[in-house]
Amino acid sequence: MRLTKYLLPFMLVLTFSVLAGCTSKDQKKGETATQQTDEKMITIGWPLDVGPLNPHTYLPNQMTAQAMVYESLVEYNDDGTVTPKLAESWDISEDKTTYTFHLRKDVTYSDGTAFNADNVIRNFDAVLANREMHSWMGMVNHMKEVVKVDDFTIRLQLDEPYYPVLNELAFVRPFRFLADNGFPAGDATQNSIKVSIGTGPWVLTEYKKDEYALFSRNENYWGEKPLEEQIKIKVIPDSESISLAFENEELDLIYGRGIISLDNYTYLKDSGKYKTATSEPLSTKALLFNTQSGPLAELKVRQAVQYAINKEQMVDSITHGTEKVANTLFWDAIPYANIDLAPILYNPEKAQQLLDEAGWTLQKGEKIRSKNGQPLSLDLIYIATDAIQKPMAELMQGELAKIGVQLNLEGADVMVGLQKLMDDQVDINFWRTNGPPTDPHSFANESATPNASGVYEAKLGLPNAKEIDNKIHQLLIGTDEEERVQLYTDILTVFHDEALFYPISYETNNVIYHPYMKDFAPRASEYDIPYAQMDKEK
Amino acid sequence: MYESTWMFCLKRILTLPFVLLGVSILTFVFIRFVPVEPAEVMLRLARVAPTEEAIQALREELGTDKPFLIQYLLWGKGVLQLDFGTSFVSKLPVAQELFAKLPATIELALAAFVLILGFSIPLGIISALSKHSIIDKIIRFFSILSVSIPTFWLGFLLLYLFSLKLGIFPTNGKGTLAHLVLPALALALPSIGLFVQFIRSTIIEELQQHYVQYAQLRGLKNSVILIRHVLRNAAIPLTSLLGMTLGNLLGGAVIVEQVFSWPGLGRYLIESIMNRDYPVVQSYVLIIAVIYVLANLGTDVLHRLLDPHLMMKDRRD
């Protein structure tokens, strides 16, 4: 039929007009169609929108964005020390219940308004109006009042000593400071703020929800000014898409833990086209054993499971070397955690021997050990969507089968696993530490009281569970530093010797960036991305 | 004649409230089957240890501490006044959020629709007219391929080819026409494949009808026969397919928006399900149901207008 003669050209014209339309439009602006990033701007991809940038609330605010705009009285560093930030110095009373902070006098907000004691008190009051929401932070439950001493001095009064005050004040939220002009009617910042004005190095200048947020350098910044003029955070929910956008030079770098899959990270790294960097450890991936009932109530079974798994091989093969093998629950730079503990290293014979001693024996012709007719079968829950937990779980299943232990796997939603462990319906769960600056004290806190971390319930089967809780309470409110070091040593040693946790690996922030960017050091922090140190070769 | 079409529309519109009631109850129940409640999810996502006090305070704030039926009635009462509640996560009115994102999804769906019609009609005709030729085989091969490829994979394939290797289109975001091409294409391709097959077989069937032979005998040009008679008759079954396609587009948009970082409703839904943002999910389903019902109604009406037989049948009934 002759009509085909017209139709084919029509199709081609349609296709090419679309292509031409797109390219010519962009070339008018003197760019290629896939827009490269600007040299005065650092562009990064992030899976979620930055949120309303409210310094006093949590979701949907992204910690990494809150930290760009707002600052705290003190700062926590990667080596575990606390140094001055908006407070230039502080005094702590003899009885450790009064903290007096001397504020810097050279700080103004990005809108030029004053940072002073009145404004600090206003922020504290707004946060404490919503105490329940912040009750996870031990300090909040001990705060009696915060009062102004003079224009640049404030006093924080506790009801009893609580040693981690400075660490908790350093945290990204809620104790950070909003300018007077940012406060809503009635100062109810728990609901919303009027506008995001902080003292930090960046100011939000352009924002399209769920598309991008553009931050510009705060020209009034009191500290060291950022090297680059602007930071653009593009919202790219899919990790594969982030990876592609980076390869396409639409992003300057990828920064963080789990922003892209490890396969993609390895692929980009191995291509040899990009620079990479890894931070010091920030949190620990571990297994948490439920001691309340079942075979894991026995220490020897818990130890056997740990001896049976070739951890080095597992971590290297699954994380492609981006995570470091962990033999203790906390990394040495975590305060109070640098103690000598004997690591449990891969030793399948020892695992078999321990199980035999515990009476879990292998009958003739059987593959699974049993005791009094009960097979040695354990349940492990992992997060179904987690690219690392699933292969690790499968690998452990294979390792344990070799010593006659049946491991049943169940993939679940993020929230389900720990709930089941608390309800004593599962034996093993993946677990991770919070990381600095709230560890180890928040870990201690969570281990001693029923909450959603699961540790309190998991340790109920330990012979000295009550004693541990008392020690934890003592170390949080005690005033003697030597005694505290000893208490931490005791508790971490007991947890280690009782094999309550099986430490797997230390998680790090992985960074991959284009060669035109200057080197910078990634931080071992969940929320502090060192944007101020980033720069491009001009 | 028109009256019956009006009546037909009226009947269908009168059933709409019942559809919406059913849909909203189902959504309300199903979303609560998802384990772990919103209060705890929010606290965990915020890296806050969910203490009993914090969970209780949040439950009261969200209203999830009330009995199930009361929650539903409260929400339903709001919906009747066009108040879809407040998002648990953003603390903003749900309606404001949804309607802010709706245009992006509609833009994507419309672009996909244009591509579907623009590509599938010519390709289907070419395929039918050159039956069993090499061109026909190529077209059929690609249309089967496009139907079988999973959308998310197709999306990445397009990104890899047109952004990374050829550098024609950007990989993410929204703004220029260039940003729209790949997501619209990814959304449209599976439907294009389906349509090409359908149009091809309809035209082949139509060409074997007696009236075509008569027309040829009367000396009418082939192009006239094709355009004025064959295509017109072939368009009738096509309209019902269009209605079904809309559902595919809305469903596909969820995945496409995720892959191409397109700030529309689909992506918002995924996030809201993860965050157990009940009011958002409930309202989203409701809005999609309304769109779906109205679109189906539209195609049915179009179908009736194009096909006089249906009208006649109605009258006889």
Image: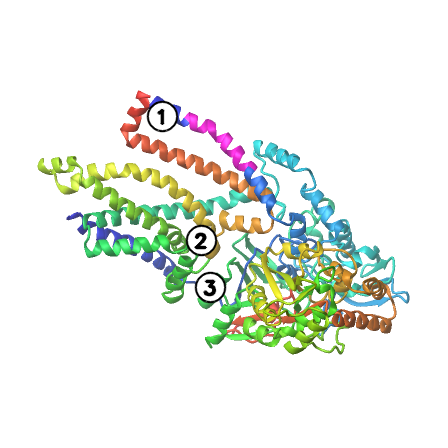
Front-most of A433 and A468?
A468
Q: Nearer the viewer, residue A481 or B198?
A: B198
| Marks 1 & 3 on one chain | no
Q: Nearer the viewer, residue A245 or A291?
A: A291
Total marks in image = 3
Question: Is residue B99 part of the magenta span, yes or no?
Answer: no
Q: Nearer the viewer, mark 1 or mark 3?
A: 1
Chain identity of mark 2: B
**Secondary element at image label 2:** helix
Measure the alpha-carbon separation of dots 2 and 1: 36 Å
Discs 2, 1: same chain:
yes
* Other-residue count near label 3 (Cα within 10 Å), few / some / many at <14 / 14–19 / ≥20: many
Type of the residue with mark 3: Ala
Residue on which the image places disc 1: B5
Furthest residue toward right = A94
Region rendered in magenta: B10-25
Residue A280 seen anywhere in this rendered image of the structure:
no
Q: Residue at x 52, y 37 (%)?
A: B23
A233 with respect to A53 (left or right): left
- Which residue carries the number 3 mark? A245
